Image: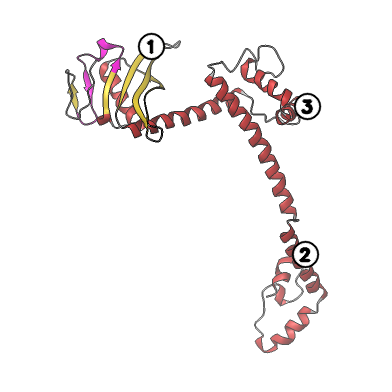
Amino acid sequence: MCFCCKLFGMKRISSLSSVGLRDWKNLSSLLSSHEKLPDHLDNVGKWKELEQRLKKHKTIDDETQRARERVENYWQQILERLIALVRVLGVQNLSFRGTNEKLYSSGNGNFLKFVELMALFDPVMSEHLRKIRNEETHVHYLGKNIQNELIDILANAIKEEILRNARAAKYFSIILDSTPDVSHVEQMTVIIRFVQVDEDNAVIAVREHFLGYVPLQETTGAFMAETILEEFKKMDLCIDNLRGQGYDNGSNMKASTMVCRRKSFKEIPGRCSCHAQLTH
């Protein structure tokens, strides 16, 4: 079968351009006649032209690929700036949103105001806001859903780094407190404390980190203990390495039935069979 005629031929000019042949006896003459056909010569020219275009990156697909890479690079630059902005607002403990979500309006919050500020000096962000104002794009990554998603992504990355350091330190302690939110759902705060050793710089420091809120359907000691153990499982922390606990809701934790991963036990001062000391 003729390679170039099979790929570039628009019509069947001989059996060599479609299914091939089996006439081995007359193969030489058939090949010779096929190579002299005008359509075959045209297909060979197309094949060689494509070969040169591929070497010089001048194909239509290559132009499409470069256009896609330009779009990807543009959005990467936008997201880099927005992620940096989210980090700054988080570190400074500033609110993100105001009373509206419209650019260049009063009361639109810190996030959009800082975006407007960046556009004054940054050509990438300036071009981005120009496209939004002229309605050239309806995808802008400035809405509340994107803000929340960026916050969640950064929060998960920070939490995983904290837990990685806690696992490296091995031994840790926890501090728990709970209070109802505006919807009257009890929220338990989880704080972890451990000693971090930097062997390269010979620095030893006590680290204390807030890991988040855990909603509680009940405030009994048994339910809180079960919740704690479940959170340890999610965070991949071994309860055998727990060396200290601090609680609010002491009356709930004291003398209540606690649920251990290995067995249920009556809380008494000291440790259970798995060395999980869950006392106030």
Q: Quadrant of the N terminus?
A: bottom right
Q: Which residue is mark 3?
A: 134
Q: Amino acid at mark 3?
A: Asn
Disc 1 to disc 2, C-alpha distance:
74 Å
The local secondary structure at tag 1 comes to strand
Disc 3 to disc 2, C-alpha distance: 42 Å
Task: Assess whether mark 2 and mark 1 are in contact (beta carbons under 8 angstroms).
Answer: no
Residue 73's place in the image compared with 203, above or below, is below
Residue 220, image quadrant: top left
> What is the magenta range?
246-263
Q: How is the image coloured?
A: secondary structure
Q: Please tell me which of labels 3 and 2 falls first in the chain.
A: 2
Q: In the rendered structure, which disc, 1 or 3, sits on the residue that comes first in sequence?
A: 3
> Which residue is located at x 81 percent, y 77 percent?
37
Give the quarter of the image for residue 10.
Answer: bottom right
Rate crowding at label 3 as few (under 14), some (14 to 19) or many (20 or more) other CA atoms within 10 Å: few
Q: Is residue 42 above or below residue 95?
A: below
Residue 41 occupies which quadrant of the picture?
bottom right
Q: Give the residue displayed 25% in from the left and 31% down from the top.
A: 240
Tell me if residue 252 is in the magenta stretch. Answer: yes
Q: Can you see residue 131?
A: yes
Q: Secondary structure at mark 2?
A: helix
- Residue 97, percent from left and from top: 60, 16
Residue at x-position 70% and y-position 69%: 6
Amino acid type at image mark 2: Glu
How many marks can you see? 3
Query: Measured from the top left, where is residue 72 in percent x and y?
Result: 66, 40
Q: Mark 1 is on which residue type?
A: Thr
Q: What residue is pinned by disc 2?
A: 49
In depth, the one of 214 and 11 nearer the eye is 214
